[in-house]
Image (tube, rainbow, N blue to C red):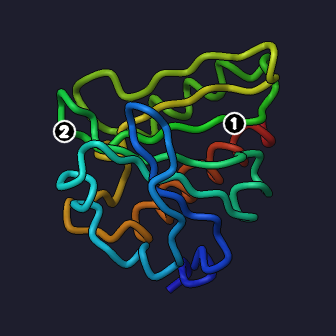
Amino acid sequence: MENEKWSFNNSYIERSNKETEEKISSESADFLEKSIQYLKKEMNEFIYIEDELFDKIGVDGVSLEVDDLFHTYDVMLGLKLPKKQENTIRTYLNNALKGEDIKFDLMFDGQDGLWNLNFTLDYVDGFREDMSILEAYRAIYQLLSSLVDSVKNN
């Protein structure tokens, strides 16, 4: 499987409280084998991962949590792409994410020089409610990697 190289074995993995953002614990790569439904059981938590794979595409880290109201899986990250690429980013996300409701939030932070991007994992191609956290992060990486390639080739 192509995704085997995206093992996230050397990732920094942290579980934190959604309200306070206090770290609950650091986790090993074994934690990623759990089902993403873990987040529906632990609604007060989010998972944060830093990995060199994300670094290579201009993403410092990626948070994953379940939305309290809609019970969807939400992805939050900062993306280092030029501000002038807004239309390309929006077009890519509008085409790549599938769903009826608002699919993503994108806002440029001039102080940090990066895009704050939030999107619903449920709308990513290949999403399954029974996927592992690892499979979820692989799907996120694949989407973001393709987005960055699209911007660079524009």
Q: Secondary structure at mark 2?
A: loop
> How far separated are the C-alphas under marks 1 and 2?
25 Å
| Disc 1 to disc 2: CB gap under 8 Å | no
The residue drawn where x is 32% and y is 21% is 102
Taking the image as shown, residue 36 lies to the left or right of residue 118, namely: left
What residue is at 82 percent from the left and 25 percent from the top? 82
The relative height of residue 31 versus residue 24 in the rendered view (above or below) is below
Crowding around mark 2 (Cα neighbors within 10 Å: few <14, some 14 to 19, many 20+) is few
Q: Nearer the viewer, residue 14 or 61?
A: 14
Residue 106 picture quarter: top right
Give percent across and percent down for residue 22: 50, 42
Q: Mark 1 = which residue? A: 79
Q: Residues within 10 Å of mark 1 (few under 14, many from 20)?
A: many
Residue type for callout 1: Leu
Q: Looking at the picture, does residue 115 appear above or below residue 109?
A: below
In the image, 103: left or right of 62? left
